[in-house]
Image: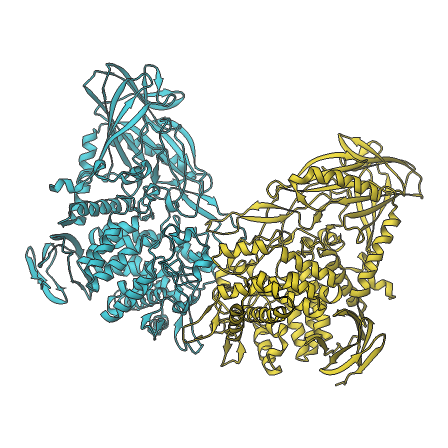
Chain colours: A cyan, B yellow
Amino acid sequence: MDTNDAFQIHLQKLPRQDERAIETIYTLGNGHFGVRASNPLQGKSSHYKGQPGMFVNGFYDLTELSYGENYSYYAQNSQTICQLPDPRYIIFELDGKRSDETPFDVKLVDKNLDMRTGVLLEIFDIKSPTNKQFRLTLQSFASHADKHVFVVKYSVSALNFTGALTVIKQANYIDQPIQNTGDDMRAAQPNMALDRTFIKSKIPTMLISTRKSQLALIVGQQALSDNPMQVAVIDDLPCHSKTFDLTQGLTQSFSFAYAVSYPHPLLQTTLVESEFAETTEKQLANKSFKDLLTASTAKVDQFWQNSDVDLQGDATLAQGIRFNLFHLYQAAGTDGQTSIAAKGLTGPGYEGHYFWDAEMFMLPFFIYTQPEMAKQLLIYRFNKLPQAQQRAREMAVQSGVMFPWRTINGEEASSYFPAGTAQVHINADIAYAVDTYVRVTGDMDFLTNYGYEMIVKTARFWLSYGHWATDSAHAGKFVIDDVTGPDEYTAMVNNNYYTNRMAQNNLSIAVKYSKLLQHNHPEKLVALDVTQDEIDHFDYAADEMYLPFDRTLKIKMQDDVSTSKPVWPIDTTPRNQFPLLLHFHPLTIYHYQVNKQADTVMTDFLFPKDQDAEQLQRDFSYYEAITVHDSSLSRAIFGILAHRLHRASDAYRYFMETVMMDLTNSQGNTADGVHAANMGSTWLSLIYGFAGLGLEKQTFNLSPELPEAWTSLRFRINFHGRNLEITITQSAVSVKLMAGRALKFYVHHQEVEVTKKSLVNVFLKTN
Amino acid sequence: MDTNDAFQIHLQKLPRQDERAIETIYTLGNGHFGVRASNPLQGKSSHYKGQPGMFVNGFYDLTELSYGENYSYYAQNSQTICQLPDPRYIIFELDGKRSDETPFDVKLVDKNLDMRTGVLLEIFDIKSPTNKQFRLTLQSFASHADKHVFVVKYSVSALNFTGALTVIKQANYIDQPIQNTGDDMRAAQPNMALDRTFIKSKIPTMLISTRKSQLALIVGQQALSDNPMQVAVIDDLPCHSKTFDLTQGLTQSFSFAYAVSYPHPLLQTTLVESEFAETTEKQLANKSFKDLLTASTAKVDQFWQNSDVDLQGDATLAQGIRFNLFHLYQAAGTDGQTSIAAKGLTGPGYEGHYFWDAEMFMLPFFIYTQPEMAKQLLIYRFNKLPQAQQRAREMAVQSGVMFPWRTINGEEASSYFPAGTAQVHINADIAYAVDTYVRVTGDMDFLTNYGYEMIVKTARFWLSYGHWATDSAHAGKFVIDDVTGPDEYTAMVNNNYYTNRMAQNNLSIAVKYSKLLQHNHPEKLVALDVTQDEIDHFDYAADEMYLPFDRTLKIKMQDDVSTSKPVWPIDTTPRNQFPLLLHFHPLTIYHYQVNKQADTVMTDFLFPKDQDAEQLQRDFSYYEAITVHDSSLSRAIFGILAHRLHRASDAYRYFMETVMMDLTNSQGNTADGVHAANMGSTWLSLIYGFAGLGLEKQTFNLSPELPEAWTSLRFRINFHGRNLEITITQSAVSVKLMAGRALKFYVHHQEVEVTKKSLVNVFLKTN
């Protein structure tokens, strides 16, 4: 297999899976929007069971949440990402039959995604009701050069006839079903509607607005210069249309670009739409498919240059890794107004919400390889501080902010608070991500202008939400009651280890950066009302944070009482009863020791210096035995810890179970969208796991150990302005400084230095 | 005030309150149905803001519950009692104007309820659109002799004219709004519909059915013999109609009886409706208002004979007490298929659901004074054992039954499980009630045929839901995790004291009655698969039940960690922020020590021998300070305990705050229905509190202490077939054996004996 093959996702090489999962896998996106790879004649094709659509990051409607008992300050609305009409949609007319009126038979022949260019190639064989057959080839990409643009080239060649074929491309796709289903417990229909269509600056355009969130979005369609096409009005709808004289064996092509605006308040539409059409026409009118592709590919090249992970020794795995990284790239918002949804922009699952996994499972990849993107993702949270402050006050938390558990617009959208709002750890997760970003990039401007405020305001939350204990079990300690940790099979507990340890970190870094900025930017402390007294409080609460520990088992306790409950009979529970939350009442599940996912061991992962190997081994063994991995966030963490424990085969097994999750549809719900956090976990597993990357003071350490099957692992990281290429083999680590000043770092905790344009090689002991 | 006055509820003597609260207060019922005392011309009266309606015990529709996140085995339907058309409704026609088409002005002049007879007298002055005035007087009662019958006598007298007045009484009241709102967090609209109307056996009849629960109810209307009226069909609707020639100053009267069937499955309607009409005609056709009243009054007399509590020294209070007892009588189902709803049959509040308060707050009154009614209320629970067993299995509880927290049909209807299904104490509450019934009545047949099975199956629940602890804090003890106690401001805790103590009692009485029946009815044990091994398990778990205790504060702890949380700042919380649950998120409330109602101190109340006076004093003081009494079930318990602590003024204050709750609408929500459990609390406060009644082995003790303001307190109780009249004054207790064999009992724990037809006097020490 040549290098190029490792960047191809070829349908013929994937396991057979349902059409909707295929659509998800081949979704194209660029952080602003995602377009599912559906049948372009969909809707009227008699056998079609797919779910076509486009998702625009941050374009959602509000849907009223309903409760049997509706208490104060419950989230009143969910936010549901809108499933927009599919821009790939096309109508053919042959022998007077239109494909939107009479079903044409569409057979998918092949698909291939070239991740080097971002171009998806698809081949369909189509038969008209009059039995004329032609082949439709699509080449499409979401532009990474101009985030507003989606490009499709259609090529048609007659297979068994010579004659006229008319193409109609409507601007409004009105025939398309607009549907929205989720794969979790929620189902909501946004009240989105096509507001109107019009032609402006020769661009057939549609305005889509939402009923309740009062957002609007404009999508315009431009025929490209490859084969210019006139604007027409057919059935009162603006469109492009052309009749081709097909000759059997010859191919005719035509291309379109779609411009997708940013979502904006409906009230501003008049202003936005004029400018939008003019700009679109100016940018696109004289461009060819190739022009636009060249610009986009240059950006994709840059992405791979910094973000590729090149695994040698297992071609399938190497391909799977790149697939996951490419999807992360396609999912991440870059405008500071959006983040990464749990399903990226590939499907309607989880309603398009952002969760803690954006910061804890996906952001590290961007921090180390695309720091500018990471910064924008953190700025999204910064921009939502006002909503988080409002939420804290609603929850009677008098100081600081309280970030929502699930959200698009910054307001809480969780309708089941014991596994939603009660997961207050998200405050500390965001602070942890800010700290990691600053430690890795050294970006002091970000710290000063954005990060410090986020850290201080989340730290304040803990002082208000927690309290100083007076009871004998916790006397003198700072405790945090009534929270839910990452493990959603245990809810509403006191002193969840993960939460407390993360809160402790939140408070500690608030102290650290307060001290730093007291010297460099004292005005920031004044602006935020940070006093020495408050810094001392942060410090004291961090020092005295209660961390539950079972003295008999000598393990970190998940919470104050976790180890005293009976253990769920995992081995005797039939396989079809998993995931448990789909088969048992939450109260039944809470009644037992059983973990949906890594919880306490997340702290072993995040704070490697907290414990020695023996402690890690005990924690790992205990929690591995009670964890059912019903969450896709679980296995990677156990895998990374297995690596640290030199349990190579366990580490490899956990990794293998995660990296191919969506390509093989192993969870069975890829149809609803990719598992973006799991994709982030792939990178965590490789870099934090097998490469053993860990932060040290002002530098980092590598403690690599490759699975036997692998020949080498090569990747790049950015660190404080340097760009380093790291290659790990079974016997050595070599590090090359591609850009930036010399750097001292550690390999297996032994200091080495890499200097400009040099290569440092460290030979590893072989066991 | 003469004796008779103490049985009158005269509108002029009540504080001014809104029309809907007045309708609730004057609701007439008989356990089968309740009819609100609304404007009989309602609906079309321009100023009318009332909520007319009839509620039939057990006649409900299912309404789908909606959840933002819908988990396994969540209650999928609520059960909502149907608000049926008002049988009092009447149409007048005067000068060609019909009151259902053109508003007639209706002014309420007066109301009076005579609780001796159960007759409600109401006077309305009515003005037609043509300015003709007449007075309408209603006399109505719900028959206690024939539970199916509601009777109204209308009297009209012209005030300023002489002329014709036509009366139309439709059988279907189709003009009436059917509405349903609740005073708690829930609002649901049943899909009830008027199915059809017809005339059968000269009875204009309507069939009302529900859409989802598929129940049907038949209501027929019969003109009574006082002033017979012909059946007519007007506007295609069966009705009675008559034109009266009114002469100014003369009164004309006419009476109707309404027969209200039991709810039955819709499929059986054809069978039921034929028999219903025939029976109704036979029973009612030749009866007069007086005939029916005489029969009913005889039953009401019997009620008062056994159930009256005669307080001398405070006439207002005496009247308030009787009002509460009368409403309990009106609310209690008597057919073994129904129980007592939280609002009785007076309003739509809490959707007409039965809760634990039926057993814990209302049943004692019936056990001691109307044991046959008490038995039927317990048989209702017995009849719902199959549903409770099904629910246990759904919740993965392998043995025993799990009664629903709120229900009509025996299935769980709670949509917020942390304050619903998690209140598993209801199992033990029902067992406690069975035990109390058996101990007071000595009814061994009930024990053998019903009670024992309920006790065994609830006891089994605890063995399955709880577990033997292995952690050091509880080692060797039986613990019960993840429950919510009566206090709904604390949820999902481990070892709630109330729950554990009640579960212990449940297990103990299972042992006690198993041992008893092993001798008397060994076949019952065989039938229920009760083995000696299981009895030993019950015994052992009861012995080793963990009861949390704070060794520093020396108080019973509400749960394992209750005393370690910060105390809610009750004093500095503005009054308009209560009840807290309407102003704060549940997670905010759970975060603090704050009690909605008596929780741990309920065990001090229910198990007086558990603690000495010092312990009681400590528990009382601690929990009184953190209890906000946002539940109407709270104050009475604190009042009874204050009595035991000889804190006379506290006991009196708590009592005064509860007894007048509905007559003064002190909670502000009497409009939605009476607070039936609070009414039961009145009796508990008087008899368990001021009279100091407590059970002893095969007998009872009285430790009375009357408030200074009271001259005497006289009441009756049944005990093991005896009927005793007890009179307490400031200086003496006198007990008269009205029926049954001699009995030894205690006064202030000193034994006395009352023999047949004798009177025993015990003089009390005055302090």
Question: Where A244 falls versus A58 (above or below)?
Answer: above
Q: Nearer the viewer, residue B142 or A280?
A: B142
Disc tally is: 0
Q: Does B755 sit above or below residue A740?
A: below
Q: A80 left or right of B257? A: left
Q: Is residue B545 visible?
A: yes
Query: Residue B411, percent across and down?
Result: 57, 52
Q: Is residue B250 above or below residue B544?
A: above
In this picture, residue B630 sits left or right of residue A665: right
Q: In the drawing, does residue B613 fall left or right of residue B320?
A: left
Q: Nearer the viewer, residue B695 or A439?
A: B695
Q: What quarter of the picture does the N terminus of chain B occupy? A: bottom right
Q: Residue A145: x and y, percent? A: 22, 39
Which quadrant holds residue B97? top right
Q: Quadrant of residue A611?
A: bottom left
Answer yes or no: is residue B362 visible.
no
Please name whichever residue, A636 or B72, is drawn nearer the observer in this view of the structure: B72
Observer-nearest residue: A678 or A709? A709
Q: Position of residue B79 (x, y in %)?
A: 60, 49
The quarter of the picture where the C terminus of chain B appears is: bottom right
- The answer to whether residue B84 is above or below residue A629 is above
Q: Locate residue A433, reporting x and y percent.
A: 29, 58
